[in-house]
């Protein structure tokens, strides 16, 4: 029985591409001490706030920002506040923060949706919607678009017609007929 490999999701491929790019740049810029900067490069990937989601990958997974190693050496206000809590208070605060992770993820999803709307709006600026009336002459695209007639090779026609619009249907659909009425 033949085993099939499933391709990873597109977002995982994009994230992997970013990580590979960061690692390549870190290694190329520091050929002799690549082993020292590799951890910093990976940390940068983990800490980068994604424009699409508005959150870092670490925050989406664990519900809070990662603590930088420098914040342990030179305690920041955030670290000092956590150190002053009792174990029970700290545990309660972390559980509360985990409950809020769902809200962060939903906010990230809304950011992605808003970005998609912006991209669609920018793309659709160049689209000119055309409407046809009954009796108009039109060309019809040959589907699938990748189809090529062996007799013409790469010069295969991508359109056929002319056709006449016989009926206008809802949602921008049309019923076509040949010029001879079929």
Image (cartoon, rainbow, N blue to C red):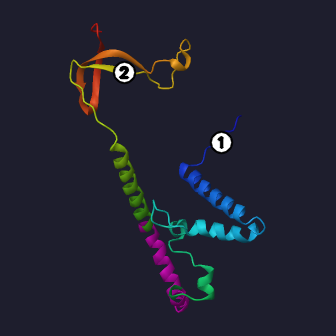
Image position of 32 (left or right of 146): right
Image position of 94 (left or right of 33): left
Q: Which one is closest to the eye, mark 2 or mark 1?
A: 2
- What count of labels does the image hold? 2
Q: Nearer the viewer, residue 121 or 109?
A: 121
Q: Nearer the viewer, residue 110 or 75?
A: 75
Neighbourhood count class around disc 1 (C-alpha, 10 Å): few under 14, some 14–19, many 20 upward: few
Of marks 2 and 1, which one's residue comes earlier in the chain? 1
Look at 70% across and 67% down and name the residue there: 38
Mark 2–mark 1 Cα distance, whole angstroms, equals 38 Å
Q: Nearer the viewer, residue 99 or 70?
A: 70
Q: Helix, strand, or loop for circle 1?
A: loop
Residue 95 in the image: x percent, y percent? 49, 77
Vertical order, 161 against 42 (above or below) = above
Look at 49% across and 63% down and name the residue there: 50
- Residue 140: which disc? 2
Neighbourhood count class around disc 2 (C-alpha, 10 Å): few under 14, some 14–19, many 20 upward: few
Residue 133 in the image: x percent, y percent? 21, 24
Of all residues shown, which one is farthest toward the top? 180
Vertical order, 179 against 171 (above or below) = above
Q: Is residue 101 magenta?
A: yes
Of all residues shown, which one is farthest toward the left? 134
Vertical order, 36 against 4 (above or below) = below
Look at 33% across and 39% down and name the residue there: 127
Residue 176 in the image: x percent, y percent? 29, 18
Residue 118 in the image: x percent, y percent? 36, 53
Q: Over which residues does the magenta segment extend?
A: 79-103
Query: Quadrant where the C terminus lies?
Result: top left
> Residue tagged by mark 1?
5
Dominant SS of magenta comes to helix
- Residue 55: which disc? none
């Amino acid at each position: 029985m033949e085993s099939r490999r499933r391709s990873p999701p597109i977002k995982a491929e994009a994230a992997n591409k970013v990580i590979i790019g960061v690692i390549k740049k870190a290694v190329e810029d520091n050929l002799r001490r690549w082993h020292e900067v590799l951890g910093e490069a990976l940390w940068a990937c983990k800490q980068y706030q994604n424009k699409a989601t508005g959150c870092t990958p670490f925050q989406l997974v664990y519900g809070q920002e990662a603590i930088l190693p420098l914040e342990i050496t030179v305690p920041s206000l955030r670290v000092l506040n956590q150190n002053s809590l009792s174990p029970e208070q700290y545990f309660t605060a972390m559980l509360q923060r985990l409950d809020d992770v769902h809200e962060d993820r939903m906010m990230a999803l809304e950011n992605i949706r808003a970005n998609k709307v912006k991209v669609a709006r920018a793309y659709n600026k160049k689209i000119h919607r055309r409407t046809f009336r009954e009796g108009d002459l039109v060309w019809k695209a040959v589907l699938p678009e990748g189809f090529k007639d062996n007799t013409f090779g790469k010069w295969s026609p991508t359109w056929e017609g002319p056709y006449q619009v016989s009926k206008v249907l809802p949602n921008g659909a049309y019923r076509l007929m040949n010029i001879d009425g079929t």
